[in-house]
Amino acid sequence: MLTAKRTGMWRGRYEIGSDGRPVTVWDPSWWRNGGDFEIAGKRFRVRAAGWGTKYRMSDEAGKEVALVERAGRKHWSMRAGRDTYEFRRASFFGSRQELLVGGKAAGSVRRTSAWSGGVEADLPGMPLPLQVFVVGVQLALWQRQQSAAG
């Protein structure tokens, strides 16, 4: 299980851990919706495209690694190579996103606190960089929603 905890009040950086061990830091972009992170010496960049409903994750060479489509919608998906992961928002008012396998919930991403910005993600069978990508996209969406509401 991944956890994300805000490291400071203003910048929006998050320390992401797996099973209690630090894995990476989500560093939000100042100018564009998205962020950057590094895992095992590999850097990844996440950026929104279009109207903020598509997010691309690229490696340090600029090659696309994964793509989230329809971000923020009731049903959305992530494509990485030959794999496609389907998600749905569990309820209209909630922030919980469910990973679907065969149409049934098999994992989730949820905000643990609106005040601290904490996040938990249980995404079984998904490679770690893709899990961080999903969490980063959710953080970017929630940050955008907070900015629009404030």
Image: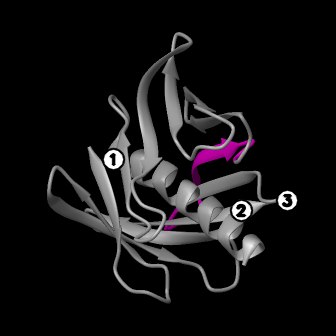
Q: What amino acid is labelled 3 in the image?
A: Trp
To which residue does mark 3 refer? 51
| Image coords of residue 48 (percent x, y) | 71, 62
Q: In this view, does 112 lie to the left or right of 91?
A: left
Q: How is the image coloured?
A: one colour
Which element is circle 3 on?
loop
**Label 1 vs label 3, nearer the camera:** 3
The x and y percentages for residue 149 are: 74, 71
The boundaries of the magenta stretch are: 59-71
Work out whether residue 97 or residue 19 is closer to the camera in this orientation and state it: 97
Q: Earlier in the sequence, mark 1 or mark 3?
A: 3
Type of residue at label 2?
Answer: Ala
Residue 122 vertical position relative to residue 40 in the rendered view, above or below: above
| Mark 3 closeness class: few <14, some 14–19, many ≥20 residues within 10 Å | few
Q: Which mark is residue 128?
A: 1
Vertical relation: 84 (above or below) 37: above
Res 42 visible: no
Look at label 1 and name its amino acid: Leu
Q: Which residue is drawn at 69% across and 84% down?
A: 31
Q: Are marks 2 and 3 in contact (CB under 8 Å)?
A: no
Check the picture and name the quadrant holding the N terminus.
top left
Element class at badge 1:
helix
Relative to 106, 2 lies left or right:
left
What crowding class fits label 1: few (fewer than 14 Cα within 10 Å), some (14-19), or many (20 or more)?
some
Q: Is residue 111 visible?
A: yes
Left/right of residue 128 with respect to residue 145 in the rendered view: left
Distance CA(mark 2)–CA(mark 1): 20 Å
Judge left or right: residue 133 versus residue 1.
Answer: right
Residue 6 in the image, given as x and y percentages of width and height:
38, 74
Q: Mark 2 points at which residue?
A: 48
The quarter of the picture where residue 91 lies is top right
